[in-house]
Amino acid sequence: METVNKKEFAYKIAEEGGFYKKDAMKMVELFWDTLLDYLEEGKKVNFYGIGHFKLKEVKGREAKNPKTGEPCIIPDRKKVKFYPSETLTENIENE
């Protein structure tokens, strides 16, 4: 599976939408900044037909250092979760 980076993503938006590349890059940056702002406020961000993003808190735990075998503590952290919609899942399965 090939990976598409942010720049390639923005350039595709520019090409398809008839925008300047720098404007499309600003749109992508603004999209992610806005998404993160809402997630940090504790809000779920929903895109109908695509899915939703949610900030999830992961509890810390005790683990072992794989190199030394010594026990260590992994602290609490937050991570962004994406939950695809049924529509998106069906579209991918039908391709």
Image: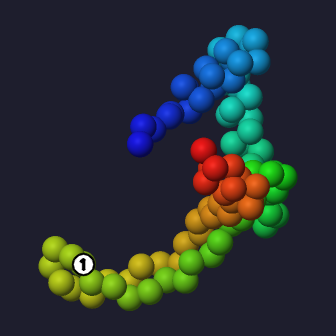
For the point 62% across and 75% down, which residue is it? 57
Residue 51 can be seen, yes or no: no
Instruction: Tell which residue pokes out farthest to the left in this image.
Output: 68
Q: What residue is drawn where x is 55% and y is 72%?
A: 77
Numbered marks: total:
1
Confirm whether residue 65 shows in the render.
yes
Name the image quarter holding the N terminus: top left
Left or right relative to 79: residue 5? left
In the depicted view, which residue is nearer to us: 52 or 60?
52
Quarter location, residue 63: bottom left
In the rendered structure, which amino acid carries the disc numbered 1?
Asn
Query: Where is mark 1, residue-wise?
Result: 65
Give the quadrant of residue 74: bottom left
Q: Is residue 70 left or right of residue 75?
A: left
Q: Is 62 or 9 nearer to us in this picture?
A: 9
Between residue 50 and residue 54, name the one nearer to us. 50
Q: Position of residue 64 (x, y in %)?
A: 27, 84
> Residue 90: where, in percent of width, then height?
69, 56
Name which residue lies at 59% across and 69% down.
78
Q: Secondary structure at mark 1?
A: loop
Q: Is residue 71 left or right of residue 40?
A: left
Q: Is residue 34 left or right of residue 5?
A: right
